[in-house]
Image: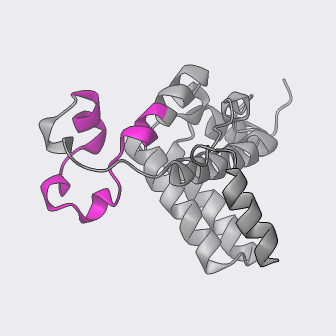
Amino acid sequence: QGNTVEEVERLEKIEKGTLSEYTAEFITDKEQVGISKKTLLNYKQCISYLEMFFGSNCNVREIGYKEISSFRRFLFAVPKHHKYKEQLKGKDLKLLIEKKSKLLNGLEKQHINTVIEILKRSKSIFRTFENIGYIDKNYFENLDSISVKSGKKRAYKPSELKAIFTYC
């Protein structure tokens, strides 16, 4: 069809590209742009979760809405500071979560803000993949947002209001 060698190679890369390849390219681009070390570290943390769930050799074109939804549920099940938990070292965390392992009993789950941050970074990474043409659709864009509720609200008692206004 008149495709150049470069075009054919690019199309093959898109067809066979893995999460590991594309995220390595993403990180290299971010390093060259000169983003802060903290932001870079956050992206790398996000990528580790993506690879933990999907596998580093996963073809990103095969990640759809259903898989993204499962990834979000997985993030909510991951124990807080899991890398530092002695009983989890060397274990397949995804498998432990899927099998509802007793090793996870009693371990505090990640904070909702951590999950939101990972999903936000994932959305950004996959937006880049979409813009480059590695994927046709960024399914992270379709995820419902997670709201963080800040405790119960209550009305002030008249005595509390009086104390506040008297103080002022």
- Identified at 61% across, 79% down, the residue is 37
The reply, left or right, for residue 91 in relation to residue 39 is left
> Which x, y percent locates residue 33?
76, 74
- Residue drawn 74% across the image and 48% down it: 128
Q: Write down the region rendered in magenta.
A: 73-99
Which corner quadrant holds the C terminus? bottom right
Q: Nearer the viewer, residue 20 or 108?
A: 108
Residue 95, magenta (yes or no): yes
Residue at the top extreme? Answer: 66
Q: Nearer the viewer, residue 85 or 63?
A: 85
For the point 60% across and 45% down, which residue is it? 119
Examine the image and state in which quarter residue 146 appears. top right
Looking at the picture, does residue 38 appear above or below residue 140? below
Apparent side of residue 89 relative to residue 93 in the rendered image (left or right)? left
In this picture, residue 54 sits left or right of residue 100: right
Task: Find residue 63 and report its horizontal and vertical position in percent.
Answer: 56, 28
Q: Is residue 84 magenta?
A: yes
- For image coordinates 61% across by 49% down, the residue present is 150
Q: Residue 87: x percent and y percent?
A: 13, 55
Q: Residue furthest right?
A: 2
